[in-house]
Image (cartoon, rainbow, N blue to C red):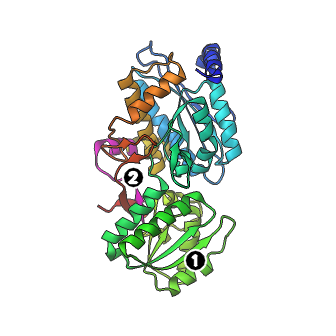
Amino acid sequence: MNYRNLLKTGLAAVMAVSLAACGSSGNGGSDSGSSDGAGSTAALKLGASGPITGNAAVYGLAVQHAAEIAIEEVNAMGGTQLEFNFQDDQADTEKAVAAYNALMDWGMQISLATVTSGSGQAVAPNYAQDNIFGITPSGSSTAVIYRDTVNNTDPYGVLFQMCFTDPNQGTASADYLNTHKELGSKIGIIYRSDDNYSTGIYQTFKAEADKLGLNIVDTETFVDSDTDYSVQVKKIADAGADIVFLPIYYQPASQILVEAEKQGFKPNFFGCDGMDGILTLENFDTSLAEGLYMLTPFSADAEDEKTVNFVKKYTEKYGEVPNQFAADAYDCVYAIKQAIDHAGITADMSTDDITAAMVKEFTSMTFDGITGTSMTWSESGEVSKAPKAVVIENGVYVGVE
């Protein structure tokens, strides 16, 4: 055991009584203690960070809320108990490091890592150094799990993903458009050139599209500081695009849709998981998103019992339909429980032993959740599961297949 593991084990023991009495949420964090459950099982400390304030709060709140629902359910079953601490990192790399340190001081033993990829990349070396197992619901960049992101090699080994990696999203999107040519045959692309998420998806989409012989008629870029997309939209329209691929987050996508409406440009639009959230964007006319397609691991209108129960509970508790970030977080908690139960992990084990057991379980188990069935993970931490296509109809997401 390294020095920090020894220190935090001692700290956890010293803090146990006070934490049981009052909880520990940190600055802007959320702490959900375990229920009494079986009454004799000590709770494992599950940490996470993400934006619950700021521009990306829709993602962090979705993950926090869904994780809390899952933890309440797990703790009510008896047996494995989880104590949850969610820190607000505002999708900022420096705040993510501070959040990680706060979680370690609290005694974190297992983690949902970070919500966003930038924060995940910032703290990934810390997880590896301290040997803490983490599975991110939504940090899709390969930089979250690999040290070498140019070649996607040298994995950290302790970090896993429940979401698709950015390269996989790009490949899957090109494959989908190839088999659904009725959506459009002349592809325009608008992506953000200073964002790892967007460029990662674009690059693999382009490579797969070239391999498949898809017709990309124009490609436009923008950067984070841009607020006017009129030039990009006009060039795409002038190129004759009948489908526009937007591997970007929903905030700039909403402005592109507004601009397309102004110019009378009406192609099909197609996005990835970053598009999820566009229907809840304040002051956005959601009618402009009608007919927008996206690839996602989760469809809230699915009729299987697990999804129906989750959507009902989430909607009743938070007044909105859960997005795929919420669904991935819900699955993360249950995948963690499955690994804990099968390995016989207990709260009094060292973090080195907990991490070794969790890695062994995740690289050998199969998991069925609401974002996919028969999920498996590679030793690098990448998940294997099938994406689903949804389309926005009458202001809600509707499964296509």
Can residue 24 be seen by looking at this rendering?
no
Name the residue: 50% across, 73% down.
189
Name the residue: 51% across, 84% down.
237
Nearer-N-terminus badge (2/1): 1
- Observer-nearest residue: 333 or 94? 94
The answer to whether residue 5 is above or below residue 370 is above
Where does the magenta region start and end? 293-311
- Observer-nearest residue: 77 or 231? 231
- Observer-nearest residue: 148 or 331? 148
Position of the N terminus, as image quadrant, is top right
Q: Which residue is mark 1?
A: 259
Q: Amino acid at mark 1?
A: Glu
Residue 375 within the magenta-colored segment of the rendering: no
Label 1: how many residues lie within 10 Å, few (<14), some (14-19) or many (20+)? some
Side of 250 relative to 314 (left or right)? right
Residue 24 place in picture, x, y as percent = 63, 26
Residue 128 place in picture, x, y as percent = 58, 35
The answer to whether residue 8 is above or below residue 241 is above
Q: Which residue is mark 2?
A: 297
- Observer-nearest residue: 67 or 221? 221
Give the image quarter of residue 339.
Answer: top left
Q: Secondary structure at mark 1?
A: helix
Residue 272 place in picture, x, y as percent = 46, 61
Can residue 241 be seen by looking at this rendering?
yes
Residue 373 place in picture, x, y as percent = 31, 45
Q: Secondary structure at mark 2?
A: loop
Residue 305 within the magenta-colored segment of the rendering: yes
Name the residue: 35% across, 35% down.
364
Q: Amino acid at mark 2?
A: Pro
